[in-house]
Image (cartoon, helix red, strand yellow):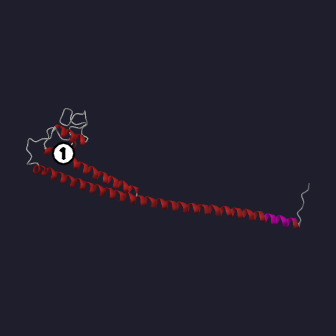
Amino acid sequence: MIPAIPTTSNAKAVTILASIVAALILAAVCGWWGWTRGSASARNELKAEYATNLADAYREAAIKQQAEATRAGALAAELITTKRAIEAERITLRGRIVYVTRDIPADCGLPDGAVRLWNEARRLSAPGVPQAGGPGGAAGQDPSASAADAGVQPGASIADALANWVDYVSWCEGVVAQRNSLQELVRGWAR
């Protein structure tokens, strides 16, 4: 077959069609180029915004951490001051025991039943467990335990019982002060 020779109207149609196809290709290329540039620009903007937000979050976290560390330090200092005041009061009270018991005869001691009750009330002994001062010491007590933990020994004087009570109350106040400081610290974390 012999190819048809384009006529003027056919040549014009082919030229128009080629122009349309070229325009579509050019539009597609321009659209693709614009989309990739716009997408890259948007990605860069998002990355910059993310980096800014991340830096802000780190900065805020560092500020909050510093504030919490400062607050914890202040609570620790307050606790130390409180414990020192409790110890000073304990020493003062122990010094006064001599004066409040001076009129009690020296041979006046606490009966064994009173000693046992005293120590049981402090949870230092239980029925069937050796008493303080007896063989084996108080229940589960370390021989090097503090005076507040030792309880009252059998045959103890009123002054010994008062001294033990003062030590115990001071110890309790110290524990309460520690608990209060820890609660305040945890409340701060919850904010």
Left or right side of 185 for 24: right
| Residue 88 percent location from the top left of the image | 18, 54
Magenta stretch bounds:
10-18
Left or right side of 148 for 22: right
Left or right side of 16 for 100: left
Q: Which residue is mark 1?
A: 164
Q: Quadrant of residue 89?
A: bottom left
| Residue 152 percent location from the top left of the image | 18, 41
* Residue 185 is a magenta residue: no
- Above/below status of 134 relative to 157: above
The kind of secondary structure the magenta stretch mainly shows is helix
Q: Quadrant of residue 111?
A: top left
Residue placed most toward the observer, 87 or 102: 102
Residue at 36% across, 59% down:
67
Dot 1: element: helix
Residue at 68% across, 63% down:
31
Residue at 87% across, 65% down:
10
| Residue 140 percent location from the top left of the image | 25, 36
Residue placed most toward the observer, 89 or 165: 165
Residue at 12% across, 41% down:
109
| Residue 170 percent location from the top left of the image | 22, 50
Residue placed most toward the observer, 104 or 68: 104
Q: Residue furthest right?
A: 1
Type of amino acid at the residue the image marks with label 1? Asn
- Above/below status of 141 relative to 42: above
**Tally of marks:** 1
